[in-house]
Image (spheres, coloured by chain):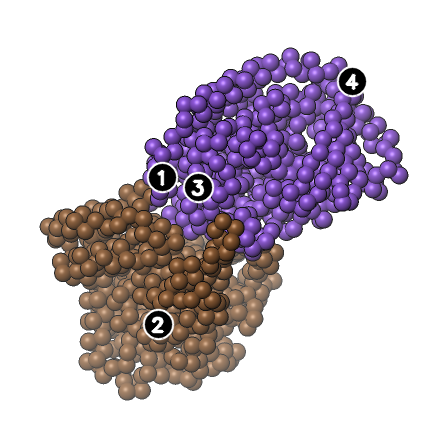
Amino acid sequence: MILGLDVGGTNTDVVFLSQKGVQKYVKVPTQPDNLFKSVLSGFTLILEGVDPACIERVVISTTLTTNAIVQQTVTPVGMIVSAGPGIDPENFRTGEHYYAVGGSINHRGREIEPINEMEIQIVGEKLQKAGIEYVGVVSKFCVRNPSHEILIKRTLNKQFKHIFLGHHVSGNLNFPRRIATTHMNAAVYPLHKEFFQAVKQSLEEMGLTVPIQILKADGGTMTLEASMDFPAQTVLSGPAASIMGAIPYAPDGQDAVVLDIGGTTTDIAFLVDKTPLLEPVGIQRGGYKSLIRSLRTDSKGIGGDSALRVNDEGKLTVGPDRMGPAMAFGGSVPTPTDALVVLGLMEEGDQDQARQGIKSIADQLGMAEKEAAEHIFKICCNIILKKTFEMIDTLNAKPVYTVHDFLEGYKFSPDTILLMGGPARFFAEKIQDMYQLETIAVPYASVANAIGAALARTTCEVTVNADTEQGVVTAHEEDFAEPISKSFSKDDLVETAYSLLKGKAENAGADPDTLNEVEVVEFQEFNIVRNFSPKGKILRTKIQLKPGLIHGYESMLNQQALEN
Amino acid sequence: MLNAPHKTGLVFFPAFDWAIDPTHPEREERLLYTQDQVTEEGVFDVPEIIEYKPEIVTPKDIQRAHFCVPDEQAVTTESHLISAGGAKAIANAVMLNEVKNGFALVRPPGHHSMRVTHGGRGFCHINIEAIMVEYIRSQYGVKRIAVIDTDCHHGDGTNDIFWHDPDVLFISLHQDGRTMYPGTGFPSDLGGPNAKGSNLNIPLPPGTSNEGYLYVIENCVLPVIEAFKPDLVVNSAGQDNHYTDPLTNMNFSAQGYARLTSMLKPDIAVLEGGYAIEGALPYVNLGIILAMAGIDYSGVVEPNYDPERLKQSVSITDKIKTTCDQIMTYWDQRYELREAAGEPGQIMTRHREVFYDTDNIFERQKEKVRVCRDCGGSFEVDSKATPGNHILGVHIPINACKACREQGYEFYDRADNTKYQRIYLQDRTTDLYEVKQ
């Protein structure tokens, strides 16, 4: 039995799943100022009449860190960056307590200029004087050689509560993103820690003692303990939960689009054979770009509550803003939801108010009321699908770096659309009609996000580099480095990567059953040639535990989908 | 977050799975370290820097610039097609005003490929800049283009393709041909009779440093460009002038390259050579990208950079000044030189030999061009290669006058079928390419 909880902007949804299906679900209003209370009341309600001893797994997805970052209510932290030659690191300043120091490592991981410990101590004193407790340390090319970061940490360790190092964030190169990500981890850490320790304690008091899993932006889970080192990975786990909730209904072996139609926005995501596509580098939304692995989603400003207007040219516009709820629900501006009410598709809400709103639009368009409602509905479907296909074009236009990829490049082409969110079921039929694409409104659409969180399995990735000229294989993100011989091969590399991944996954609470869902994401092998003779090889690989669902639950959900 | 003053397009196509052979300087990892450096610097995250996917060129694209013997398929691999396609993709982005300028970091290179191509010369099979230039002229109707070749080797292929074309200004800066492959590119090589002065070759002595390169740009290249008034400036951005390059003997640096780029302000840069893949390319490419986007590049410095050690001698400086003066004299006399080259309607003949070092082919050419004051003049080239083929190529320039057009067709119709395996017609006025066997 599993509990899944997703804190949304409006509601906190909780589901109680058994292998037979959804046993129970509850919704409580989210209190934005007190997320802890929202979580607690959600758990209290779902556990009524349930024996806590039968719960094997608890997964929580929350907007806590997202809100903190968006609202900039995070703790001020110190950042120490060591850049070496290249772009001026001042461009990546994270705030007031940001110091660029000497020291340089090159792309092969060789030290070019050492760290000046005196300089570090002076920076440390300044940070301490400013009352800083948490510090992030990032050096350029630390992914190839983290010794400068480690040395800086060692120099300052006693003076600060926690020092976050850039090379632990990701095996990917990208200095500016690594700075941003390390900063985020440090900045949300106290908040995250306090919140989840309180949640853990409260759940224990309710008799729930199983390890708590937390949903990450890549649609996978990690244990509460593992999350303490990387709290920023929970940023944007909300959209991830929704997408995971659509997976059981996605067709096998085909491409599908997931559309989560909310009040203000529609989130768009992509599945290939039930596996969601990831952002190529990391979360990139709004003002920040990070190295946090995340599902590839985009949010467009159109939803059930988008404001409807007629512009100067007599054309209908939808959104992108929301001016409050639909008129049927007490708002003052007509919305697509009002059109659904007028069309008789939606039974809730105040009919007269909705009609009044749509009539004002109809008059401006010179149409009858029903005709206008139908027009609005169609335009909404059109906009959503247009944005979706634009995103698919972008997806298919991504650069390639080998002849093979150029010639064999996978073209994403969806056969199915999966609709989620409040108005999903009304849109499904219309979209299928208009676009002749199979369109499914996901069952339990209003709590599918909590189901997604509940069923998400552990994900992780490792990046391993071998350099036979320098005689070393490394995965600095995992604090791993070992000497190798000249004959180190591709098989050796993959074996090393696999064993590191396995250890990492088990630490993050992975079910041993899912350890075969491993995928080699990248593999590269290059000769190192000097004066026209080979001196060694560079081998690189990245392997991952794919995002997906834990076993034992998918088939049951599919069956229910049919019965619905 | 880092923002750039203007939009710059990048095509990055390192062709990680293609090489001539495993220890060849032009091999798989040539752009590996550049990719590492550029990725680590977060260059692709600058909102104004837009990465484009390369395109692939078609036989038609190649046929505007080359006579491929026997055909396009025989002298190219997919890598060549995608590399040229990378240049084409950047050209499209610039010409459609999606970006202000663009840089194609592609391989394999192309600037040693001539109009007739029997195979590989100096790691090049087809000329990626020339294919791009001809595509731009056909697709976008651009008339005047300047191609500035800053590769350390003479851009003899591009030089050959635009030899007779007064509308394409080709300037090559290179290490003196007496000390370096391909051994050509001397100041007196000024272009065909109809285009004298629109091909300028500036040989530089070994040991030339930032000072010398920037002197040439400022005192020769920029004044000539200003007088030529091109609609578009293209930079064949070879990076083997670097002081660590294993194939050359120059003392240029990443700062020098970035400075050169910001002075030249190319609309399009296309990567050519550059074989110091670990110690130079990552920094030079980064410097060029930042310069094109208008981002401060003062922090881009090679780990072992010592400007004092790289200073050029006074004798080098003097030699460069003399060469520049010579070039400017030629440039100022270009119209007189064209007048003196022959009478309109006259047919001029040129014989030459071309060696294909990569594919070990020896080619003899006999070229006939019609002297013309109104256009570039049609020409035919009789090319015999050992081992192998004997062909005739006829070229009618893009803005050919009536008389030259007729002359071109006369070359083509009169050609003796029994003498050649193939006879090609490249009529750029109608974008037509025909082959008789």
- Position of B158 with respect to A380 (left or right) is right
The residue indicated by pointer 1 is B305
- Residue at image mark 2: A504
- The chain coloured brown carries which letter? A
Whether callout 1 and callout 2 share a subunit is answered no
| Crowd tier of the residue under label 1, counting other residues whose Cα lies within 10 Å: few below 14, some 14–19, many 20 or above | some
Answer few, some or many: residues within 10 Å of disc 4's Cα (few below 14, many 20 plus, some between 14 and 19): some
**Between tags 4 and 1, which lies in front?**
1
Q: Mark 2 Cα within 10 Å, few/some/many (few <14, many 20+)?
A: some
Specify the subunit that label 4 lies on: B
Residue type beneath disc 3: Thr
Q: From the image, tell me which residue sits under label 3.
A: B244
- Mark 3: give few (<14), some (14-19) or many (20+) Cα within 10 Å: many
Q: Which of these two is toward me, A59 or A315? A: A59
- At mark 4, the secondary structure is loop
Q: In which quarter of the image is residue A430?
A: bottom right
Q: Which residue is drawn at 49% across and 70% down?
A: A491
Q: Which label sits in the foreground, 3 or 2?
A: 3
Q: Quadrant of residue B396?
A: top right
* Residue at left offset 51%, top offset 17%: B325
Horizontal and vertical percent for residue A471? 39, 62
Q: Earlier in the sequence, mark 4 or mark 1?
A: 1
Residue at mark 4 to residue at mark 3: CA–CA distance: 50 Å
Residue marked by disc 4: B345
